[in-house]
Image (cartoon, helix red, strand yellow):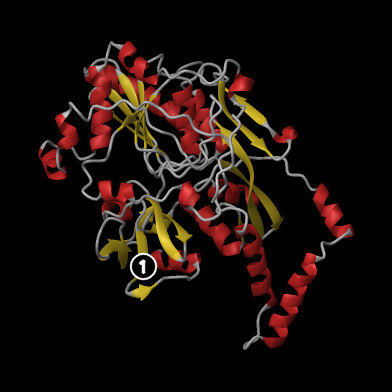
Amino acid sequence: MKFAPLMRAALLVSAVAAVPVATSGLAALDSQVNPEFDKLFHIYALIKDNYVDQVDDDKLLKGAIDGMLASLDPHSNYLDGPSLQRLETMIDGNYSGLGLSVVEEDGAVKIISPFKGSPADKAGLKAGDYITHLDGVLYYERDLDEAVSKMRGPAGSSITLTVYRPGRDEPFDVTVTRGVIELEPVTWELKDNVGYISVNEFSRDVGNDVAKGIADLKKQAATTGTGPLVGLVLDLRSNPGGSLDEAIALSDIFLEKGVIVSQRGRRASENQYYRAESMFKGDAVKGLPIAVLVDAGSASASEIVAGALQDQHRAVVMGERTFGKGSVQSFLPLDRESAIKLTTARYYTPSGHSVQEGGIEPDIEVPQLSDPDARRRAERAVRESDLRGHLINEAGLEDKDLESDKATDPRFSATPEELEEQGIEDFQLHYAISTLQRTAGKPAALAAVAAKPAAAKTPEAAAKPAASKPKKN
């Protein structure tokens, strides 16, 4: 099994970087094994001799590895053949199924996000939903790969999912017809004279794809008679993350200089600063106002981009507080059929903030009013700080004075039904577009919202976290 495509596959769920990994400890372990390991081997012998059934050595070994990694944080884990293959399939697409990104959480199957335009998306499944039954069979504390395999199948066939949605009193059934899943990481559309670019995941070539989208949107605006672009909406909602390199490339499209993100690990030699290099020949939209949409499902690489554009005062971030995953994982192959995904660094925004636990706070809070369940789901949304064993934030986040139109804008008090009557299917997107349109030709209006005081004067100082006391889990 080749690891190159599998490395790409794993980018769906976390920020992955090629971080130098120290191996000096392995030699020490060979020469002087910790006496506590005797206890592990003793327990192994007791299980082999006394368990009610014969136990396979591979099962015990995998359980021991899983236990070690699970004791570290929620994002460090062991991947063998089936789980590696599942990740590869997710990124390369061309499979028949529902189009869901899922994880196991406390024994249940939880939806990270449905891929836009997929059968799952069209059936109304949402990020944060829990799948309890598949065709009436309970899937709890079962292997996640088994559930994923059950959800895949020939295009045109159907499966019934029983869903628990936080905010709803009772579970409900959804029947979904499988289809051929072809992932589109980047899509774009011209909405009047505002460019809309949706980034669903940070997989290979996302930076180049967004650059192509901007060029196409400019061409469309010039030929449709609506006038030139007046702004750009970058939609990172429900984007669970991906490649650190692609997050940097996407940020670099709009930034001409300065730090985009820094990462620091256990050793000073592993600290790195990533700066804008104008690889796309400067700001691709030449100073046009940008609104970045985020929500509780925006994680990892999405937070890198939102944090960079926010701290550099290049964009206004709208929506809801992000997930809060501020750690970087490295893939370490064990052999041709297995690897471990290990947390090796934390990352920091240009002003020195770690988003671990706290996430990115929007400049303008905009709830998803067009979704009748959104408010209750938002109240119960699970973020990084809710995960068992999450890393502690080493740098406190500064409070922000959020801008809000809630007091004066009647749309903020409208019901989903009233918004639907007005033709508003996605309130957050509608609000972002209307804000860019009404501030067209008035860059100072949005700039006043985006202009947050920098925490430091130099890139190196900006990337240095402030001292703070550890929080208790």
The residue carrying pointer 1 sits among few (fewer than 14), some (14 to 19) or many (20 or more) residues within 10 Å by Cα, namely: many
Q: Is residue 131 visible?
A: yes
Using the image, determine if residue 470 lies above or below residue 71: above
Tell me where residue 435 appears, x and y as whole percent.
Answer: 26, 23
Q: Is residue 158 visible?
A: no
- From the image, tell me which residue sits under label 1: 132
Tell me where residue 464 appears, x and y as whole percent.
Answer: 62, 27
Whether residue 279 sits left or right of residue 284 in the image: it is right
Whether residue 247 sits left or right of residue 119 in the image: it is right
Whether residue 41 sits left or right of residue 316 in the image: it is right
| Towards the viewer: 69 or 162 | 69
Q: Residue at x 16, y 36 (%)?
A: 413
Q: At label 1, which amino acid type do we have?
A: Thr
Whether residue 79 sits left or right of residue 314 in the image: it is right
Q: Secondary structure at mark 1?
A: strand
Using the image, determine if residue 447 lies above or below residue 316: above
Tell me where residue 255 appears, x and y as whole percent.
Answer: 49, 19
Q: Residue at x 43, y 30 (%)?
A: 399
Q: Residue at x 86, y 54 (%)?
A: 28
| Towards the viewer: 217 or 414 | 414
| Towards the viewer: 391 or 420 | 391
Using the image, determine if residue 228 lies above or below residue 186: above
- The quarter of the image holding the N terminus is bottom right
Tell me where residue 284 appears, x and y as whole percent.
Answer: 44, 19
Q: Residue at x 55, y 44 (%)?
A: 471
Q: How many marks?
A: 1
Using the image, determine if residue 49 lies above or below residue 365: below
